[in-house]
Amino acid sequence: MKLHKAILAAAVLVPAGALAADTAMTAFVDSLLAQMTLDEKIGQLHLPVGGDIVTGDIMENTIGADIAAGRIGGVFNMKGCNQIRDYQRMAVENSRLGIPLIFGMDVIHGYETVFPIPLALSCSWDMDAIEQSARVAAAEASAAGICWTFSPMVDISREPRWGRVAEGSGEDPYLGARIAEAMVRGYQGDSLRNNDEIMACVKHFALYGAPEGGRDYNTVDMSRQRMFNEYFAPYKAAADAGAGSFMTSFNVVDGIPATGNRWLFTDVLRDRWNWDGFVVTDYGAITEMMVHGLGGPADVSRMALDAGVDMDMAGQMYLNVLKGLVEQGKVTEEQIDTACRRILEAKYRLGLFDDPYKYINPAREASEIYTDSNRAVARRIVPETFVLLKNEGNLLPLAKTGTIALIGPMADAANNMQGMWSVARTAADRSVRQAMTDALGTNAQLLYAKGANVYGDAVVEAGVTWGGHDIRDPRSADELLAEALDVARRADVIVAALGEASESSGESASRAHLRLPDVQQRLLEELVALGKPLVLLNFSGRPTVMVYEQEHVPAIMNVWFGGTEAADAIADVVFGAEAPSGKLTMTFPRSEGQIPVYYNHLPTGRPRSDGPAPFEKFRSNYLDEQVTPLYPFGYGLTYTTFAYGTPQLSAAVTSGEPVTVSVDVTNTGNRAGNEIVQLYVRDVAASMSRPVKELKGFERIALEPGQTKTVTFTVDPAQLGFYNNDLEYVVEPGEFDVMVGPDSGNVQTLRFSLSE
Ligand code: BGC
């Protein structure tokens, strides 16, 4: 038995209970650290990528040798019990102290059972469903040997040009914070000690969602009060929910790369928020600090360690330079001990010292992945993520009769249904065409034509369909179009499945143009010209610009990328077995020139009027574009309609007591439906300019036809504050507007006063 095993046996005699468990952990880690050489401690800070190394080759591979030498703390993006067991055995049996490895992976929106992309999930506003999606992901990933996921990504973003909005929860800090908590709970469960609970890694700290020009990895610069008021809430919520780890972001914050930013990781995350997990860099981010212009390997490694960054992902900076820095007295061994301690504590919390093979269970791997029940969880959520943007004359749902033409590059693109970051997925997927064919049976005829590639230019298309998502048709644009028009002419109704491909969003997938790509725009215009009933299913990983569509297409539904169950959910929603019930969590602009356009903006001193004038001189508006977005935050229709009564306030004046706001919501249509009722607040006069509205509550309700429900929100005075320029959270007495409605652009307002 290894030395530390003996210590563990003694440590577990400490009585149970949170504090006692911490004491036991500290005692255990103290003893282990006391036995470790400096090299072994530095080894724990090293996280290489292990993706393509196959079982059996480990002995020849440098990772294998490094594990045996105690030069590795964990490995990431590798899956499967066999492979992971080999690595773990190497660490436990061949390294001097037998310290187990931690195995990480990007399990972003499901493992083998793929859920809708995170931006889509956020549009459900369904916290239970989102938590369950993380729970299923954790259960499946852990059955394949993984104990740590690089999720949730909680970066607030107002930048639809930035492709990584697909990975987050949109633009709102309040909603983002609730989702962050739900995801952490889903992954980590109650204790992290069970073998189906995995450690969350909150990313990317911080502000990654605000890159200049929407270009990935680009500079971020904002005031600290804005960070605290508008961007930090989800990170803090995830920290408070007990997330075990955080990841750095690639961008600079206050001119310093986040990965070397001591203010972020030590002053804010650890000291101010009192969080005690471990921090891993993003991929090679310490190395990239050299490119940012922060010096050589020694400079950047020292800076990162000083900042409070514990583990170096996919770089060899810490591994190669830290020992020399200790010898030169530029970093202390205590600093290395601190970083190493945090990583050992994570392994302890995961129970890996009790059982390094805790997550290696081939029986679970064979029976608990991609199960019917997991797929059923995913299937239930998908329609909640679809956002119906327009439905003129109740064109949707379609009747299962006559001839239906299904047209577009996404119509028969099974391998594009998952969306970005579905790296663990291996099973075959279904396309909308297959699902609609099955849903229709013999009731109606389904005709199909591709109509267009994703882009006219093959090189551009290759950028958005790489990694197994290639769907290019070699025929010319004219040939594809002619075939589609021929098919469409023979149909009673057209369903167009257009938009982005799987990899049009995600990492390094920024777009300067957010309209439908060239050939698809032409296809859509030709379909519109036929004058037939036309439904647009818009696939996207971000808000796109849909002004033409809004003007010319009678029914538009954003279906994002819905994962494993997307195709069948689309068919069921199109034909009315289910209804779409999502609402936007990011504003859809009218044009790229409006970006950033978001609902919770500050008032200007010269707002333009609501009047019909296209342009008002010396007002804050555009000569050639409206100020308002095309679709506001919170917006979304369904197959029934709702009427809101007049909201009621519990008190017009309050002295520190919570205020309640109630509103009756009635289903005025003739089918059951779900509504997401939203509550916004505005601080009317404060010591700083405050947003025109901020989300402070929401509730998803189900209503039968004719049914009315009273929705009651409680607004606690503590929710009415903000961070001032000294970064103190202050609640200032005075008047507040409270607004209730179906979306941020459609609210009824009441006013109350908060007295001293
Ligand atoms: C991404 C991270 C991801 C990491 C590991 C990076 O490029 O920014 O979000 O977790 O790679 O795959």
Image (cartoon, grey):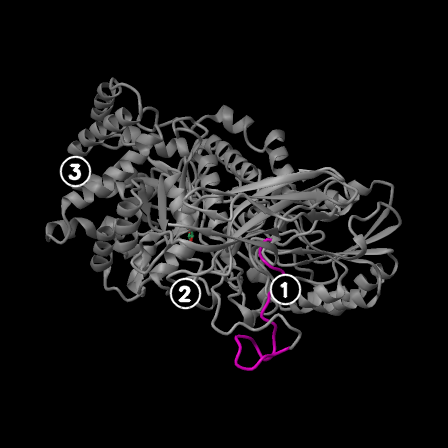
Amino acid at pointer 2: Asn
Describe residue 528's horizontal placement relative to residue 722 as left or right.
right
Near mark 1 (Cα within 10 A), the count class, few <14, some 14-19 or many ≥20, is some
Q: Which residue is mark 2?
A: 218
Which amino acid type is shown beneath numbered disc 1? Leu
Residue type of the residue flagged with mark 3? Thr
First in sequence, mark 3 or 1: give its number. 3
Left or right? Give the position of 462 relative to 579.
Answer: left
Q: Secondary structure at mark 1?
A: loop
Tell which tag, 3 or 1, sits nearer the viewer.
Answer: 1
Instruction: Name which of mark 3 and mark 2 comes first in the sequence.
Output: 3
Distance from mark 1 CB to nearest ligand 1 atom below 8 Å? no
Q: Is the magenta region chiefly helix, strand or loop?
A: loop
Q: CA distance from mark 3 to mark 1?
A: 61 Å
Number of marks drawn: 3
Location of residue 166 in the rendering, given as x and y in whole percent from the top left corner:
53, 53
Magenta-drawn segment: 614-634
The residue that label 3 is drawn on is 37
Q: Nearer the viewer, mark 3 or mark 2?
A: 2
Query: Label 1, on which residue?
Result: 630
Front in this rendered view, residue 349 or 665: 665
For disc 3, the neighbor class at 10 Å (few under 14, some 14 to 19, many from 20) is: few
